[in-house]
């Protein structure tokens, strides 16, 4: 799993455990986990960008690109009210949907 | 119609959702990505595909037909396989050019083995290189047989024009001549010299304790070398030992290798990824390799 700027506050293990309960080959599980990761990533990035001005968006993208996460978080904390909470919530919401998709399979 | 497996159901649904999220992101924040690409020097100039460096984590290990669908449907602009590949490699590699950690090595291997039709490994027959990610410098042409000079070295005038200026190395490669004479020079010998790299065989873990074994192992060992910044890759052989540790570089490349990879020497030197090629039957030809 690649380390993203939000890795420390976003939990993905629940989805992984639910996938474990399905009859999946290891490469299938790996593929699905990557799709989970990709969806969470897009939702988080969208959440952050939506809160930033055009100039700050560019700074954020640059810092994400260069993995300068210390500066990135300084920016987010300075520019977004309750940045961490908003990111957590966005990730939790998409995670819930993904868990529901898995549960629906079992019906 | 056969019933879909759990995997297939989730895969299809999540690929669709992923596409929708990408399109939404692009629609809402496309201007920011445009601005970044057009004003940041580290991006490939004008390549909108590079935006995915920022927005995509490692591309899922999709079957190639699926990944191409995603690429086509999500990228409103020129957007090809190499973009995904470069994106994923950049995400997997450390910010600095330094030895890879275990997870970084695993991630880069996974990407290379996913996106090329050849298989690579960091360890073969219990032997590893000291580094698989480092800077590469320009090497000179190696004499392939006694009497091989710049005048005899190239098959045609175009190659002589393109590659002649790097000159011939004053000494031989680590394993001497590639052939005993011009008459015994084979196409394989020619390819080995043309597509050779130098690696620091002498600092490979275990070298000092197993010198003879290691020298034999490394001789013309096939490798995959990749420029992670443009996705260009080649199957090459280890044709020489070097460069010296004091150079600050970890690999050397023949003029042909360097030109293809678009790597240069000097202050603008750049990194490459190098892994052993798994080719037990010696069927993989030397030279450029394309993404699947």
Image (cartoon, coloured by chain):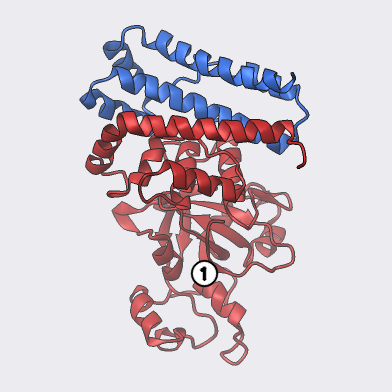
Q: Nearer the viewer, residue B202 or A103?
A: A103
Residue farthest to the front? Answer: B1
| Quarter of the image where one finds residue B189 | bottom right
Q: Is B107 left or right of B54, judged from the image as shown? A: right
Residue farthest to the bottom? Answer: B183
User: Where residue A2 sits: x, y (%)?
Assistant: 53, 30
Q: Nearer the viewer, residue B222 or B234?
A: B234
Q: Is B266 left or right of B112, judged from the image as shown? A: left
User: Which residue is pictured at 45% across the width and 44% down the height?
Assistant: B73
Q: Is B44 left or right of B225, judged from the image as shown? A: left
Indicate the chain on which mark 1 is placed. Answer: B
Q: Nearer the viewer, residue B272 or B138?
A: B272
Asked which secondary structure carries label 1, the reply is loop
Q: Is residue B228 visible?
A: yes
Disc 1 crowd rating (10 Å Cα; few below 14, some 14-19, many 20+) is many
Q: Is residue B197 above or below residue B19?
A: below
Q: Is residue A61 visible?
A: no
User: Where residue B24 sits: x, y (%)?
Assistant: 39, 30
User: Where residue A99 sits: x, y (%)?
Assistant: 62, 18
Q: Dot 1 corresponds to which residue? A: B195
User: Where residue B268 sits: x, y (%)?
Assistant: 31, 53
User: Which residue is pictured at 45% across the width and 84% down the height?
Assistant: B153
Instruction: In the picture, one chain is red; tell me its letter.
Output: B
Instruction: In the picture, one chain is blue; tell me its letter.
Output: A
| Quarter of the image where one finds residue B181 | bottom right
Q: Is residue A83 above or below residue B162?
A: above
Q: Is residue B156 above or below residue A79?
A: below
User: If the image is split into quadrants, where does the C terminus of chain B sit?
Assistant: bottom right
């Amino acid at each position: 799993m690649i380390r993203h700027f939000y890795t420390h506050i976003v939990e993905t293990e629940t989805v992984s455990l639910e996938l474990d309960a399905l009859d999946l080959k290891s490469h299938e599980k790996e593929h699905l986990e990557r799709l989970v990761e990709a969806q969470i990533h897009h939702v988080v990035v969208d959440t952050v960008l939506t809160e930033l001005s055009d100039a700050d968006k560019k700074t954020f993208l640059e810092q994400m690109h260069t993995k300068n996460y210390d500066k990135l978080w300084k920016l987010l904390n300075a520019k977004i009210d309750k940045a961490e909470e908003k990111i957590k919530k966005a990730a939790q919401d998409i995670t819930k949907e993904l868990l529901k998709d898995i549960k629906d399979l079992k019906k | 119609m056969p019933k879909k497996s759990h995997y297939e159901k989730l895969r299809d649904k999540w690929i669709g959702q992923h596409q929708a999220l990408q399109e939404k992101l692009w629609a809402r924040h496309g201007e920011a990505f445009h601005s970044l690409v057009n004003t940041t020097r580290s991006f490939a100039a004008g390549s909108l595909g590079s935006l995915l460096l920022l927005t995509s984590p490692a591309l899922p290990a999709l079957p190639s037909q699926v990944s191409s669908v995603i690429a086509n449907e999500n990228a409103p602009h020129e957007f090809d396989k190499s973009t995904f590949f470069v994106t994923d490699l950049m995400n997997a590699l450390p910010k600095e050019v330094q030895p890879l950690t275990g997870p970084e090595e695993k991630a880069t291997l996974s990407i290379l083995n996913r996106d090329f039709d050849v298989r690579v490994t960091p360890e073969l027959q219990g032997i590893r290189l000291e580094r698989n990610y480092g800077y590469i410098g320009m090497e000179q042409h190696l004499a392939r047989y006694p009497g091989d000079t710049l005048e005899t070295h190239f098959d045609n005038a175009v190659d002589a024009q393109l590659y002649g200026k790097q000159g011939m190395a004053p000494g031989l490669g680590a394993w001497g001549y590639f052939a005993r004479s011009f008459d015994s020079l084979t196409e394989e010998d020619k390819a080995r010299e043309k597509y050779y790299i130098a690696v620091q065989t002498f600092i490979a873990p275990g070298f000092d304790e197993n010198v003879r074994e290691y020298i034999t192992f490394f001789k013309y060992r096939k490798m995959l070398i990749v420029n992670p910044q443009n996705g260009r890759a080649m199957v090459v052989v280890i044709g020489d030992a070097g460069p010296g540790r004091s150079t600050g570089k970890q690999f050397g490349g023949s003029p042909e290798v360097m030109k293809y990879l678009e790597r240069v020497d000097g202050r603008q030197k750049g990194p490459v990824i190098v892994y052993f090629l798994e080719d037990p039957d010696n069927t993989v030809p030397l030279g450029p390799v394309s993404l699947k």
